[in-house]
Image (spheres, grey):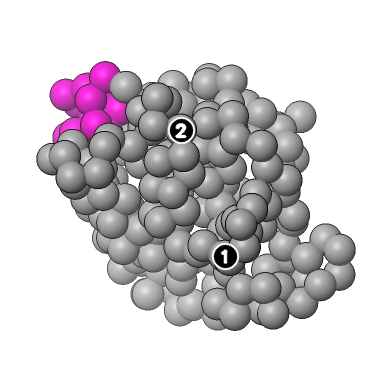
């Protein structure tokens, strides 16, 4: 498999899960500003959506969208328990978290990355982001990871998105439990490998 990624983007969650599974893979960096891969290819010809992650499968074809890619990778190595078996209530709870992080948290950050976003819109987005992290904090008050006592794929996605708080210089003090969650996840060897590979750790 080949993962098309951009350092620190949401593709980091897929990269982390790849490292957690131990599945053989290669990486290809994408410049999201120019839509060129590190080998000079036009990324939009590989993924017409133009964004990462994109996972090229060994048997051909391409998978996109973070939540789908995370589930696919996790299902390849079920013994790692990164996603619960299909059809179980636990699996639906994990899918619920993936959907929430994608639609209610991840996408709230998008205007903050654009320099032309008006200040009042940024303020509105920050308020929404805070409300989402408040909700997540309530869950993390009950157990160390989103699904309970064990790390799963949704934790990789939350870790990735929360990383943007530091990049955008947003004050994280209101969400100490989310910060603690990020520290727990960052300490995992697979996460360290992914971060170093993307140049996010020295």
**In the structure shown, which secondary structural element does the residue marked by tag 1 occupy?**
strand
Horizontal side of 115 relative to 202 (left or right) equals left
Q: Where is 137 relative to 107, above or below? A: above
Q: Is residue 108 magenta?
A: no
Give the residue drawn at x 31%, y 50%.
Answer: 98
Tell me the CA gap for discs 1 and 2: 19 Å
* Residue 62, numbered circle: 1
Q: From the image, tell me which residue sits under label 2.
A: 77
Horizontal side of 198 relative to 92 (left or right) equals right
Q: Quadrant of the C terminus?
A: top right
Horizontal side of 149 relative to 45 (left or right) equals left
Residue 199: x and y, percent? Answer: 74, 40
Residue 21: x and y, percent? Answer: 52, 31
Q: Is residue 143 magenta?
A: yes
For the question of whether residue 48 can be seen, the reply is: yes
Give the residue drawn at x 37%, y 75%.
Answer: 120
Residue 35: x and y, percent? Answer: 72, 74
Give the residue drawn at x 51%, y 62%.
Answer: 63
* Residue 17, numbered circle: none
Q: Where is 90 relative to 31, above or below? A: above
Q: Where is 20 relative to 115, above or below? A: above
Q: Nearer the viewer, residue 135 or 86?
A: 86
Residue range highlighted in magenta: 138-149
Using a 10 Å C-alpha cutoff, classify the residue at mark 2 as few (fewer than 14 neighbours), some (14 to 19) or many (20 or more): some
Determine which quarter of the picture holds residue 50.
bottom right
Count of numbered tags? 2
Give the residue drawn at x 16%, y 24%.
Answer: 142
Q: Where is 181 relative to 99, above or below? A: above
């Amino acid at each position: 498999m080949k993962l098309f990624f951009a350092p620190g983007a949401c593709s980091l969650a897929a990269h982390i899960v790849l490292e957690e599974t131990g599945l053989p893979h290669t990486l290809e960096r994408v410049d999201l500003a120019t839509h060129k891969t590190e080998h000079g290819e036009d990324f939009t010809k590989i993924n017409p959506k133009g964004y990462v992650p994109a996972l090229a499968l060994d048997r051909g074809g391409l998978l996109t969208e973070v939540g789908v890619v995370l589930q696919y990778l996790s299902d390849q190595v079920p013994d790692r328990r990164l996603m619960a078996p299909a059809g179980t209530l636990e699996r639906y709870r994990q899918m619920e978290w993936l959907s929430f992080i994608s639609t209610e948290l991840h996408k709230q950050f998008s205007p903050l990355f654009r320099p032309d976003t008006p200040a009042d819109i940024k303020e509105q987005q920050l308020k929404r982001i805070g409300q989402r992290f408040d909700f997540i904090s309530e869950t993390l008050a009950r157990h160390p990871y989103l699904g309970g006592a064990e790390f799963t794929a949704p934790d990789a996605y939350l870790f990735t998105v929360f990383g943007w708080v530091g990049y955008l210089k947003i004050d994280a003090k209101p969400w100490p439990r989310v910060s603690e969650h990020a520290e727990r996840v960052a300490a995992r060897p697979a996460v360290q490998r992914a971060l170093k590979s993307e140049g996010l750790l020295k």
